[in-house]
Image: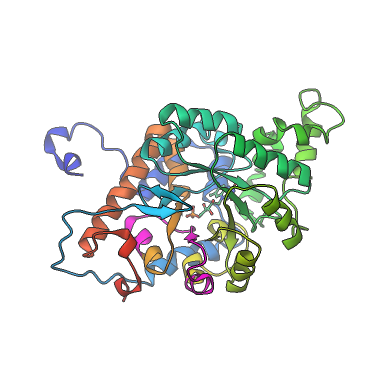
Amino acid sequence: QLQAYDPARAAEPLPPVSPEEWERRAREVLADGPFGYVAGGAGAEDTMRANRAAFARRSLVPRMLRDVSRRDLGVELLGHRLPAPVVLAPIGVLGILHAEGELAPARAAAAEGVPFVLSTVSSVPMEQVAAAMDGVRAGAPRWFQLYPARSRDVMASLVARAERAGYTAVVVTLDTTMLGWRETDLRNRYLPFLQGQGLANYLSDPAFRALLPVPPEQDPRAAVQAFLGTYVHPGFSWDDLAFVRASTRLPLLLKGILHPDDARRALDAGVDGVIVSNHGGRQVDGAIGALDALPAVVEAVGTRAPVLMDSGIRRGADVLKALALGARAVGFGRPYAYALAAAGEAGVRHALRCLLADLDLALGLCGQASVADVDASLLA
Ligand code: FNR
């Protein structure tokens, strides 16, 4: 931060330091379709706004005269020590934003020791993403996000591949058993999957290939249709979840939990953590802001498992507010996608470092030496 203020370096263009600036840069370099796909939400985007409003409605009350000369952003999560209470949230089809797709943010996360959550619908197969991360730092933390599919064989196969490739947790996203009503994408007639984007894990999967009458290389359009009919599943139920639970010994997290009763039932079903999220307001317009849903879920879960949250995290203060309401860690989403579009791996790494630097300052300036000590007493 002090380097950035140095007038001697004023000639060097300062990379964006705010998520809004990254969004503007992304808008400049992306076509309407891909930009709208990232920026848009469901319906009137009320829930997207509710996510931010929930942060704005809460205030930190900084404490003074406490020694904060040494600060610790580290947290324990699923038996691992993380450098900060932050993961890169799963975002699909990153190939529409940058030629390197998921490889760029995965490497950036690896360099910072922050877990990268790879989407089911990535543009690069999960094994290649894992290898790229290991190239930066052997065993760099990575989780695999699983969309509930119509085929149990495909789900089991994807999970087994993730285990073999060194992913250390499986995140099952529950809020996208169908795609939400996304007016921007409808207006742009833009759905990346229809152009064959985001199918890398499926096309490379033996269980999916076994469902096809001919190999995808021979009939790519038929493969896209088969993918669209398989990759999400509105019939997904607690029974199916039990199948996924039984298919792996990796920790299982459920993403998209908003109701405390679902959180309780999830724990009874043997999951290891829940992620409070409304998918960045992309699924149910009118749904509760994610931060507003957090306290009741935290209360329901108690000490049984960690609760994470995403949807609306933009700055350090947002992370602090989520932690104060009981989240163990948060997911950083759209801002890193914009940084990827505008500046690739270096952009994502810079955006992530800015978030962590901002968090470190906010923590110390609030009179807290450790994120592990942050609790509701930090809020008005
Ligand atoms: C997402 N998100 C998402 N989640 C998931 O589990 N699997 C996925 O493939 C995707 N894909 C995806 C694409 C795009 C373009 C966006 C913006 C989001 C949801 C993501 O993990 C996270 O919940 C939201 O991004 C959080 O909202 P904010 O903070 O980014 O607004």
Report the side of 244 relative to 48 (left or right).
right
For the residue pair 376 and 43, the one nearer the viewer reads as 376
Report the side of 178 relative to 28 (left or right).
right
Please provide percent x and percent y for residue 131.
Answer: 52, 28
Tell me: residue 1, above or below residue 42: above
Residue furthest right as drawn: 213
Residue furthest top as drawn: 218
Residue extent of the magenta highlight: 295-320
Residue at image position (45%, 53%) is 77
Tell me: residue 138, above or below residue 143: above
Please provide percent x and percent y for residue 212.
Answer: 83, 33
Please provide percent x and percent y for residue 141.
Answer: 46, 41
Report the side of 348 relative to 238 (left or right).
left
For the residue pair 206 and 302, the one nearer the viewer reads as 302
Q: What color scheme is it?
A: rainbow
Please provide percent x and percent y for residue 205.
Answer: 72, 33
Residue 315, quarter of picture: bottom left
Residue at image position (47%, 49%) is 334
Residue at image position (65%, 47%) is 248
Residue at image position (31%, 76%) is 380
